[in-house]
């Protein structure tokens, strides 16, 4: 079941609803209205929303191509403006406006039984059970061995599947990340509204067709995880399931990230065929259901600022799901995240000078009081319009198959072949 589609509105309405912190909608009063001992319908004409002068200026600036700071109205600091900070904290607690996350573009997530339903689907999966049967046969075991492998499989699933079961947990995460980001980057998070509206239009199209966005950001900092998830929350898009290394699955912070979409997987699967089958089946299940996935295809953070060659593991699973017909299409959604200053700059410089890599964690970085006191400028996020993976593959097959002697020619049978 998906969330309700946004109602059609004028472009200016879209801009105000997305980028203004206050609720912006038409108002009506439920009837009937009780007066004394009688119930008398009270008819009040629909009220037109009042567009304030500063809102008009904002829309005009956006239409002229200026960037929009999506946290301009939620940047209060406790020491500088305690009243405004507490007011905003109250909005987070009550779920005011976009913070309620009750109307977003994408398939339904964040309900009480979500993660258990996903695990149940995986336990009943034909691919997983076939792999368990193969392992039982290889080990020469019987029913007890099968039960043991089933328990192991369930433990692996609980390690991979995010526990996206609670909107209050999401709001707590959003409030924390909002405070961290506006302290680290005092000049805000800027996006191009026209780019985002095109991105959102593609997300609505994907939702209608029950298809997924595969979000592929560049990877320069641990802050990338927080920035993308916060933007999807702030701009009312279904949060993606984030493919993350299990090195981030730390006590406390790992659970928080897992509650908000992190799917922790091993960096290397080795010879563990059961684990690789579970991960592939889960990715294909998400694509079949039309859930969004976020994948840092560079595999690690770039130390130089240049893009790294892609790691194709997860992309292979996505392509397999498309070729098998489990997903009718997948929309590739590139996102660029640029920082005036990266908070890991010092450690990157040390690594490039040949010093041993220091062990660091996301939690250690964002809770370092020295780092939080720095003024790191702003974050700029650019949204590329998502494109159809199916159409891209079909175009490549058509183009290369027309050149039979080309070394780049793709054999469809190779795409269909399973490992």
Image: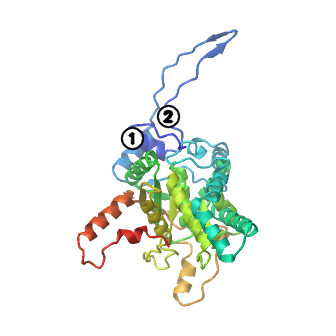
Q: Secondary structure at mark 2?
A: loop
Q: Which mark is residue 12?
A: 1
Residue lying farthest bottom? 354
Q: CA distance from mark 2 to mark 1?
A: 13 Å
Q: At 59% across and 49% down in the image, what residue appears? A: 109
Depicted 270 relative to depicted 388: above or below: below
Q: Is residue 53 above or below residue 220?
A: above
Q: Is residue 336 left or right of residue 225?
A: left
Q: Nearer the viewer, residue 48 or 128?
A: 128
- Residue 161: percent from the left, percent from the top? 63, 60
What secondary structure is found at the residue carrying circle 1? helix
- Judge by depth and name the residue closer to the eye, 28 or 87: 28
Dot 2 or dot 1: first in sequence order is 1
- Check the picture and name the quadrant holding the N terminus: top right
Q: Residue at x 60, y 79 (%)?
A: 271
* Mark identifier at residue 100: none
Name the residue at 34% across, 72% down: 411
Q: Position of residue 334 (x, y in %)?
A: 42, 63
User: What residue does disc 2 label?
Assistant: 25
Badge 2 density bin: few <14, some 14–19, many ≥20, Cα 10 Å: few
């Amino acid at each position: 079941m998906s969330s309700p589609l946004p109602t059609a509105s004028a472009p200016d309405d879209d801009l105000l609803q997305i980028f203004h912190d206050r609720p912006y909608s038409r108002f009506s009063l439920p009837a009937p209205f009780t007066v004394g001992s009688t119930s008398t319908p009270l008819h009040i004409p629909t009220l037109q929303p009042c567009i304030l002068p500063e809102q008009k200026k904002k829309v005009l600036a956006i239409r002229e191509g200026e960037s929009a700071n999506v946290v301009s109205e939620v940047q209060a600091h406790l020491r500088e403006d305690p009243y405004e900070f507490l007011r905003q904290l109250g909005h987070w607690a009550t779920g005011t406006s976009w913070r309620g996350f009750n109307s977003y573009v994408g398939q339904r997530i964040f309900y009480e039984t979500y993660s258990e339903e996903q695990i149940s689907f995986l336990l009943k999966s034909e691919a997983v059970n076939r792999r368990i049967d193969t392992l039982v046969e290889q080990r020469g075991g019987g029913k007890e061995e099968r039960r043991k492998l089933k328990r192991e499989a369930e433990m692996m699933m609980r390690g991979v599947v995010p526990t996206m079961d609670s909107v209050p947990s999401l709001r707590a995460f959003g409030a924390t990340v909002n405070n961290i980001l506006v302290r680290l980057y005092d000049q805000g998070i800027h996006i191009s509204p026209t780019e985002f509206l095109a991105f959102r239009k593609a997300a609505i199209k994907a939702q209608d067709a029950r298809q997924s966005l595969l979000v592929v950001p560049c990877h320069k900092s641990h802050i990338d995880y927080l920035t993308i998830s916060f933007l999807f929350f702030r701009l009312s898009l279904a949060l993606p399931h984030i493919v993350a290394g299990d090195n981030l699955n730390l006590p406390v912070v790992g659970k928080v990230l897992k509650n908000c979409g992190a799917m922790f997987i091993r960096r290397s699967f080795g010879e563990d065929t059961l684990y690789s089958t579970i991960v592939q089946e889960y990715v294909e299940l998400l694509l079949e259901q039309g859930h969004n996935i976020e994948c840092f295809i560079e595999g690690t953070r770039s130390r130089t600022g240049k893009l790294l060659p892609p790691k194709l593991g997860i992309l292979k699973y996505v392509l397999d799901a498309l070729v098998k017909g489990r997903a009718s299409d997948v929309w590739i959604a590139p996102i660029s995240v640029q920082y005036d200053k990266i908070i890991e700059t010092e450690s990157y410089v040390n690594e490039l000078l040949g010093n041993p890599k220091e062990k660091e964690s996301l939690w250690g970085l964002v809770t370092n009081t020295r780092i939080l006191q720095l003024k790191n400028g702003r974050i700029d996020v650019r949204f590329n319009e998502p494109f159809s993976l199916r159409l891209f593959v079909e175009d490549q097959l058509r183009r290369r198959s027309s050149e039979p002697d080309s070394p780049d020619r793709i054999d469809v049978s190779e795409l269909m072949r399973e490992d």
